[in-house]
Each structure stands twice: as C-alpha cells, then as structure tokens.
C-alpha cells in the first residue's frame, strides 16, 4: 500500500512535457482520485468544508481510488481515439492489477529463467529480445537485419517493437514480463515517453567472478528453451537432463565487454525506475532468488488517503514521530490534547464546555472528545492529505466509538518499558528564560546557571507519570483487541530508526 504520489505520475508528466515541449505540473495531469471524489461529495454549505467520513472507508475497502487512478493513468498513457470504449474494455478485464514487470541485470545472472517462471506463475506474457525478433511484423523483420549484421538495435526501433508487442490483446488482458529490456538509460527514457510504464522493476545482481563462472557452464533444453547450468541450476527431471545441449557461449573477451557495458549503464538504468525498483542478490540458490522476486512483484501500491493512529505509553515518542511523518508526507498532525485546548480557547459554546473540564482537571467526556475529533478529521485538509492521530483513544470504549466514525487504516503501537518511559519524562525540565527543554541524561543544561533555574512540569513528576503508565497498561490488551492488524514498533531506539520502521510499514499492502 502507498499513501503517496507514485512514479507513474512523474513518468506521465515527463512524457507529456517532452511531447509538448512545455512544463506541465503533475497535478495538472492527474488529479488524485480522492480529491475527485471529495469534490463530488463534500457539503459546500458547511464552512470549513467537511467530507463524510464513511466515504474514505468505503473507497479504501473497494479500492475505488486505485481503480480511478489506474483508469485515468491508462487513458492518459494510451490516448485512445474512443475513450469510453477503452475504459469499458479496462473494466472488463479480469483484474485491474495485471502485472507489468521489467526484469534486467548483467549477462548470465539468470534473467531468462526467472522471467519465464514468473510469467508462467502470473499468467502474463513473457517478452524478450529473442521473442520480439521472432515476430512476423515489418518491425521484427527490420530488427533482424541489424542482428544479422551484429549491429545494435537503434533505440527508436526497439521502443517501437516493444510498444507494438505490448499493445497486442494478450498483453493488454494478461499483463507482461519484459526480460532484459531496456539495456540503456536512453532506452529506458524512450520507453517511458512511449507509455511503457512498469509497476515493478527487478534488477538481479551478482559479483563479476560469479557471472563469468556461470557463463561457462550454460546448458539449454532444445525442446523448451529453458536454460540450466552444471553447477547452479540442474533439472529435477532426468529425462530433461539427458537431452540438454551446450549453450552458445561468447568468448571470454566478449563476456567481459558485455559485463563492462552493463556496469556502465547500470546506475543510469536503475535511476530511471528508482521508485518502483528492487535490487535482488542473485548469488544465492535459484529458489530463493525466485521467491524474493515473486514476493516483490505481488506487492501492490494503492492510492489511499492515510488515516494513521499512533498508540503507546507516555514518553514513547508519539508526538515526535507524528511531527516527522507530517513534515515529510504533509499529513495533518492531530494531537487530541492540543486539539481540545484549541477548541476550548475558541470562544464557542462547545469550547466553553470543554474549558470547564480542563479548569477543574477533570477528563473531558468521550462524547465531547468524539464530537471535536469527528469535526476536525472530516475537514478538507484531513480528507485530502490524510491524518495522524495520537493521544486518543485511551481505552476500549473510546476505540470502539472511534471505529464507528473515523476508522484508521494504519495503527502503530510504540513499545517501550516503564523504566525507559520514566527516565525520558521525569528527567526532563524547561528553562523558563529561553523556553528550551533539557534532559539530565540525553541533553543536559549547558551551565550550572541554566541548571539551577530549570523547572519541571507537575505532569512530569514521578507519581503522575507512574499513574499514567499504570492506566495505559491496564487498557493495552483491550486496545490491541480492537486493532489486531496493528504494527508494533520498538521505540527504545533513536528517533530516526523508529521513524524508518514506521515509514517502511506505510507502503506494505
């Protein structure tokens, strides 16, 4: 799953920019699907604009955003003469998630074996230079003339060949696995401009000495064309083993030249697909390589508006991580405590009611908290950009009530022991002169003068924090029962490592 703009939008922008020789912002080409729906469903009579909270939940459940984005992207890429008929044909396909995979790497790394097995398992069309040259089209005939003369195919001809093959009905309906293409950055950019935009790009890598050794023991099944090796891949079936023939191998000089050429192009190739690319170590058993490729290709990137819930004991770093996520991904940081104080200060009748509880040090009733949260989370910024909520819910009833109005689609528990929580909170103090916050262990005061004037907040006292921790532990199991698919993150590490752990799980689907 992904909550953020994907590489396809950037590639589309690049394609149209080149064709029209003007700069077109991505937002002008593809409006995010969530915004399209919001423009339709929002209540324009309410200020600030509010979005029905059930809309995002329904759209996520049925992959509406992904469906709209896939159709709109395909429409802009292919530019059919009859858009309506084209969209109908897209909807009639068995799945919107047809595979579009590029698989490349140096010679002898095992691309052909992996691509053939992958296309069979995904029921996709396996496309390679060899299969393109075997075609009977005029372009294939032209391409064969170059190979007969041992000349490199011009990038323009290769792109037209690939584009022609991928536009055929079997590739349209079943998807494709493109093996060994492109071979240069120029070819990669040309394919992108032509609308050949993969969902997944796999790069197989291995040390040069391993590749040279593999290229010397190549064996081919004359009936199927499958490639084996005396050391690395041997057929299970003895009948197949008996009919294997020596594969044509280039000279050592040719192998070294091919390898050197690939190494020169590898960085540029990878950078052309950096947002959808995975590099896999091919110096391991073939079965392990294949399983890693398959697992990556089966991941799906969804355009989903993030609704993130951060839970954890006091001192676990919820506020800090929410701020980091908000700064990087422009989601709305919603701290329940700060939100209540903000409403209490706005002079409204609801604010006055909440203020009375805050003045007396009493907990604000759930009904009022939920009313404030629902109003805030249904505003336009939260509905379009998504939100990160922390400080709520604190118990089972609050969690169940929230599920009825604003369901999160990612829940994280930041795990930390009580001892570490106490150390983080009770040893911190604030300089009343500068407003800076210091910590006795991690950020001590710069001088004895500053140290002597530091003040500790009453809520940071050992007794208060111990009580809060006790309350959190009492309700933890119940909260976890409401969110069985939540991710548990070790918060006893530096903030950057915690952030990376959170971030890596935002794109898992």
Image: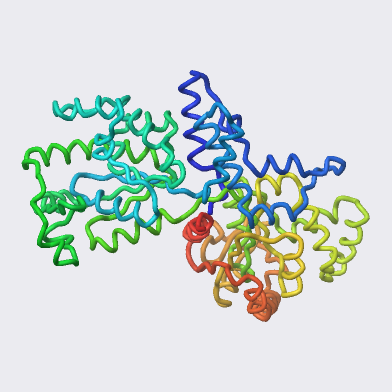
Q: Residue at x 48, y 57 (%)?
A: 504
Question: Given the current orientation, which residue lies at the most extreme top position?
Answer: 21
Q: Position of residue 355 (x, y in %)?
A: 87, 61
Look at 62% across and 59% down and name the residue there: 409
User: Seen from this angle, which residue lies furthest right?
Assistant: 349
Measured along the vertical axis of the image, is residue 98 above or below residue 144?
Answer: below
Looking at the image, what colour scheme do you see? rainbow
Q: Relative to 104, is 19 on the left or the right?
A: right
Q: Quadrant of residue 242?
A: bottom left
| Residue 164, horizontal then vertical, whole percent | 38, 31
Q: Position of residue 407 (x, y in %)?
A: 69, 61
Horizontal side, residue 460 vs residue 235: left or right: right
Nearer to the camera, 116 or 2: 116
Q: Nearer the viewer, residue 434 or 29?
A: 29
Q: Residue at the location (17% across, 41% down)?
A: 259
The quarter of the displayed image where residue 445 is located: bottom right
How far across and down, in percent of the image, does residue 270 sit?
A: 34, 41
- Relative to residue 375, is residue 195 drawn left or right? left
Residue closest to the eye, 395 or 57: 57
Q: Residue at x 83, y 60 (%)?
A: 371
- Which residue occupies the foreground of this view, 51 or 425? 51
- Is 198 left, or right, of 32 in this rendering? left
């Amino acid at each position: 799953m992904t909550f953020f703009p994907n590489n396809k939008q950037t590639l589309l922008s690049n394609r149209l920019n080149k064709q029209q020789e003007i700069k077109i912002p991505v937002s002008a080409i593809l409006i995010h699907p969530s915004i399209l729906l919001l423009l339709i469903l929002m209540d324009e009579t309410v200020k600030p604009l509010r979005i029905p909270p059930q809309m995002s939940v329904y759209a996520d459940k049925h992959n509406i955003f992904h469906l709209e984005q896939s159709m709109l992207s395909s429409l802009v890429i292919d530019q059919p003469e009859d858009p309506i008929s084209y969209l109908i044909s897209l909807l009639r396909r068995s799945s919107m998630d047809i595979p579009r995979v590029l698989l490349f790497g140096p010679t002898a790394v095992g691309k052909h074996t992996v691509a053939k097995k992958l296309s069979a398992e995904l029921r996709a069309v396996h496309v390679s230079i060899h299969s393109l040259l075997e075609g009977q089209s005029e372009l294939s005939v032209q391409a064969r003339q170059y190979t007969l003369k041992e000349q490199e195919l011009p990038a323009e001809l290769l792109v037209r060949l690939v584009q022609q093959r991928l536009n055929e009905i079997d590739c349209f309906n079943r998807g494709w696995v493109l093996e060994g293409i492109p071979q240069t950055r120029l070819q990669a950019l040309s394919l992108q401009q032509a609308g050949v935009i993969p969902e997944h790009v796999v790069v197989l890598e291995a040390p040069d000495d391993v590749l040279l050794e593999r290229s010397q023991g190549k064996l081919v099944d004359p009936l199927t064309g499958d490639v084996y090796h005396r050391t690395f891949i041997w057929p299970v079936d003895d009948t197949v083993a008996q009919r294997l023939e020596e594969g044509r191998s280039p000279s050592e000089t040719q192998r070294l030249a091919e390898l050197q050429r690939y190494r020169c192009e590898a960085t540029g190739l990878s950078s052309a697909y950096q947002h959808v690319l995975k590099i896999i170590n091919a110096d391991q058993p073939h079965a392990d390589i294949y399983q890693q490729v398959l697992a990556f290709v089966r991941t799906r990137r969804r355009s989903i508006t993030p609704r993130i819930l951060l839970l954890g004991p006091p001192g676990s770093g919820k506020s800090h991580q929410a701020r980091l996520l908000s700064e990087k991904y422009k989601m709305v940081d919603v701290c329940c405590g700060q939100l209540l104080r903000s409403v209490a200060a706005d002079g409204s009748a609801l604010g006055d009611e909440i203020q009375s509880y805050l003045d007396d040090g009493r907990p604000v009733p759930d009904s009022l908290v939920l009313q404030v949260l629902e109003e805030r989370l249904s505003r336009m910024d939260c509905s379009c950009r998504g939100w990160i909520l922390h400080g709520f819910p604190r118990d089972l009833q609050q969690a169940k009530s929230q599920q009825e109005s604003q369901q999160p689609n990612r829940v994280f528990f930041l795990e930390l022991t009580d001892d570490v929580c106490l150390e983080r909170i009770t040893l911190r103090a604030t300089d009343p002169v500068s407003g800076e916050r210091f910590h006795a262990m991690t950020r001590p005061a710069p001088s004895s003068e500053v140290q002597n004037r530091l003040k500790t907040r009453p809520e940071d006292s050992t007794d208060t924090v111990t009580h809060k921790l006790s309350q959190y532990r009492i309700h933890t199991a119940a909260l976890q029962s409401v969110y069985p698919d939540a991710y548990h993150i070790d918060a006893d590490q530096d903030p950057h490592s915690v952030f990376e752990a959170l971030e890596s799980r935002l794109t898992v689907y």
